Image (tube, grey):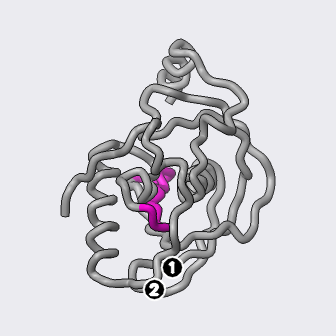
Amino acid sequence: MGIRKIIKKGDISLTKKSRPITEYNARLQILLNDMRDTLAEANGVGLAAPQVGVLRRAVLVADISGEEPVIYELVNPEIVEAEGEQIGPEGCLSLPNIWGQVTRPEKVKVHAFDRYGEPFELEAEGLLARACCHEIDHLNGILFDSIAERFLSEEEIEEMSQKE
């Protein structure tokens, strides 16, 4: 296991569409384990494989609503249902110190596979739904700054962090 370098905006690979994962093998296990370590080190809510230089359809999202965060590994994820709307702040480990207001669904249902190739569905709402959408966008070469309605000032970001 190890911590991988997070690619920053400007690297062309962040704008490319990722390929599906077809083999559930040791290489995938290593990738997911490294992504888990990298996400923990960066103190983020989500991480997509393209952010660590791997153009494959795998993401991690963290549900931080409980006492302890729960990390979901989503391989070949697809949003199969979405409802409602939420407008809120988003940031990205690949765009440090940039925050924007982004509209996302309030609830999503994601069909994905686990690290062993077993299918499952994740029903997410609020911040977890936002994280799922954000990370799946990465798999399609979309960065949040291209869909943000507006960017937030340092003062607004400071205000939000004080309220938490």
Residue type for callout 2: Gly
Q: Position of residue 36 (x, y in %)?
A: 32, 59
* Mark drawn on residue 113: 1
- Vertical side of 100 occupied by 106: above or below: below
* Mark drawn on residue 77: none
Query: In the figure, residue 112 lies in which quadrant?
Result: bottom right
Query: In the figure, residue 132 lies in which quadrant?
Result: bottom right
Pick the residue in front: 20 or 40. 20
The residue at 76%/61% (across/down) is 82
How crowded pointer 2 is (Cα within 10 Å; few <14, some 14-19, many 20+) is rated as some
Region of the chain picked out in magenta, as a range: 55-67
- Asked if residue 128 shows in the view, the reply is no
Q: Secondary structure at mark 1?
A: strand
Pick the residue in front: 154 or 29. 29
User: Looking at the image, do the residues carrying marks 2 and 1 touch, with CB atoms under 8 Å apart?
Assistant: yes
The residue to which callout 2 is attached is 117
Q: Secondary structure at mark 2?
A: loop
The residue at 19%/64% (across/down) is 1
Pick the residue in front: 62 or 151. 151
